[in-house]
Amino acid sequence: MTRQPETARRAPLSRDRVLRAAVALADAVGIDALSMRRLAQELGVVPMALYKHVANKEQLLDGMVDFVLDEIGPPTPGPDWQPAVRARILTARSALLGHPWAARVIQSRTAPTPALLGYTDSLIGLFRTGGCSVDLTHHAMHALGSRMLGFTQELFDDSPGAAPPDPAVLRALAANFPHVAELATAGAHDEKSVVGPGCDDQSEFEFALDLLLDGLARLHRSGWSSTATAG
């Protein structure tokens, strides 16, 4: 359990203080260990005191999402939309990497929170003020998906916590699926990645992001529209 100074524990309870403590607790012990009871213990209050500020745990999680997204800050528009969008997304990625549980909680929300709507609106605004059409911007947001917040959904578990591949399994893989095995053992898997071993490291995230943004820029320059290419 994280320990707060006695002066902080005696401070009047507020929604901001509840959310700040919840985020810190999730950072320290993981989102699965977070409960209203444990949070109340952390704050030195009875559990019922929390419900004056958050109606239930789902509302608490919504507030925690917004607390993390607020760390992204306002966008920095520039004369060119592409570097502005790129910088915005990488800032979001940096914020979420500071809270490893945040991406999972965002994906679990049944409706977008106010801060998530605000962030999405700001990203759309960078495309639109940069001259991209509503049509292209609409398709861009679909193409980016969760990448607009700096994370991706991997097809296989290649995370830093995943067990290292068994040599016998790799030999069998190479015998039956040589191209898969070739990529699985490729040198591009950097054990010293800024995120950790595996595929979803910073350079690979930026590689995929740049592919998308370069492609969108090409479509923008060509005056692309979905109606012109339909059928």
Image (cartoon, rainbow, N blue to C red):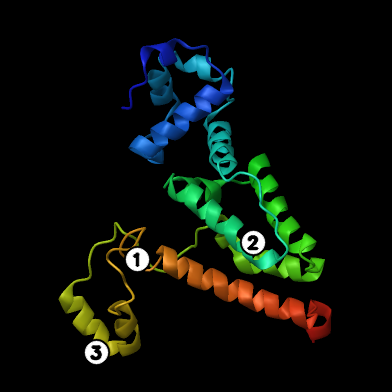
Label 2 belongs to which residue? 85
Horizontally, residue 133 falls left or right of residue 119, namely: right
Q: Is residue 113 visible?
A: no
Disc 2 to disc 3, C-alpha distance: 43 Å
Q: Where is residue 145 in the image (x, y as percent from the top left)?
A: 60, 63
- Earlier-in-chain disc, 1 versus 3: 1
User: How many residues crowd around disc 2 within 10 Å: few (fewer than 14), some, or many (20 or more)?
Assistant: many
Instruction: Choose top left, top right, bottom left or bottom right for residue 220.
Output: bottom right
Q: Which amino acid does label 3 sit on?
A: Ala
Tag nearer the camera, 2 or 3: 2
User: How many residues crowd around disc 3 within 10 Å: few (fewer than 14), some, or many (20 or more)?
Assistant: few
User: How many residues crowd around disc 1 within 10 Å: few (fewer than 14), some, or many (20 or more)?
Assistant: some
Q: Is residue 82 above or below residue 42?
A: below
Q: In which quarter of the image is the C terminus?
A: bottom right
Disc 2 to disc 1, C-alpha distance: 27 Å
Label 3 belongs to which residue? 175
Q: Position of residue 35 (x, y in %)?
A: 42, 29
Horizontally, residue 218 falls left or right of residue 150, namely: right
Q: What residue is shown at x 70% (from left), y 64% (from top)? A: 81
Q: Which amino acid does label 1 sit on?
A: Asp
Q: Are marks 2 and 1 in contact (CB under 8 Å)?
A: no
Instruction: Choose top left, top right, bottom left or bottom right for residue 218.
Output: bottom right
Tag nearer the camera, 1 or 3: 1
Label 1 belongs to which residue? 158
Disc 1 to disc 3, C-alpha distance: 21 Å
Q: Which amino acid does label 2 sit on?
A: Val
